[in-house]
Structure formats: C-alpha cells, structure tokens
Image (cartoon, rainbow, N blue to C red):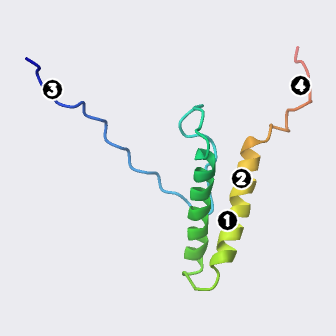
Amino acid sequence: MIERTQPAKRPADKPAATRKPGRFRVGSESGSKATAPGEGAARREGMIREAAYFRAERRAFAPGYELEDWFAAEREIDCALARSNAPDRRSAGRARPLRP
C-alpha cells in the first residue's frame, strides 16, 4: 500500500525591501546562475517599467508624458546595466606599489 505524505512546507517569503525611486540594483540577485535566452530582456523591461512608473509618480501622473518617462527610464536602466557589466577601470592596468 502507498502511504501519502504531506507536501514539504516552503519557507515564507521575506518582505520586499523598500526602494527609493530612481535607484536600481543591477547585480544578479540569485548568484551566478546562467539565464535563459530572453530572460535578460524581460528583466530589463521590468526595470524600465518600474523606473518609468516612479518618474510618472514624481510628476503626479500628469497625462501626456508617458513616452518621455519611458525613454528616460530606458536611458537610466541601460546606463546602469552598462556600468554593472563594465570592467573596473580604477584598478585595470595599474600596478599597486609594494609596501615593505
């Protein structure tokens, strides 16, 4: 006879940290997992959507500025993503002096 068991309980999700408008964390939140094709584009679009929302919120959702909000959010997110993927230029090619 097969005995049924209770499904394993998953730990409760932690509440999301509060975010400041215009500030985005670009680094990988789940470690160094490989992403599926298209997953990066979906993540980028979600970040842009959120940034555009915060821009609209700052201007009290006045109509007529939706495209400006979206394009400004695209520039902001693309710059943030480029910075996160760029090598650290502060230490690149520079030798540190040896201390005795």
Q: Residues within 10 Å of mark 3 (few under 14, many from 20)?
A: few
Residue 57 in the image, given as x and y percentages of width and height? 55, 75
Pointer 1 residue: 73
Tell me, for residue 5, which label it has, or none. 3
Q: How many marks?
A: 4
- Mark nearer the N terminus (3 vs 4): 3
* Spatial separation of the CA atoms under disc 2 and disc 3: 48 Å
Pointer 2 residue: 80
Query: Does 29 appear above or below 73?
Result: above
Marks 2,1: beta carbons within 8 A = no
Residue 83 in the image, given as x and y percentages of width and height? 76, 47
Residue 59 in the image, given as x and y percentages of width and height? 59, 80
Question: Disc 2 residue type?
Answer: Ala
- Depth check: give the residue in front, 49 or 22: 49
Image quadrant assignment for residue 45: bottom right
Q: Residues within 10 Å of mark 2 (few under 14, many from 20)?
A: some
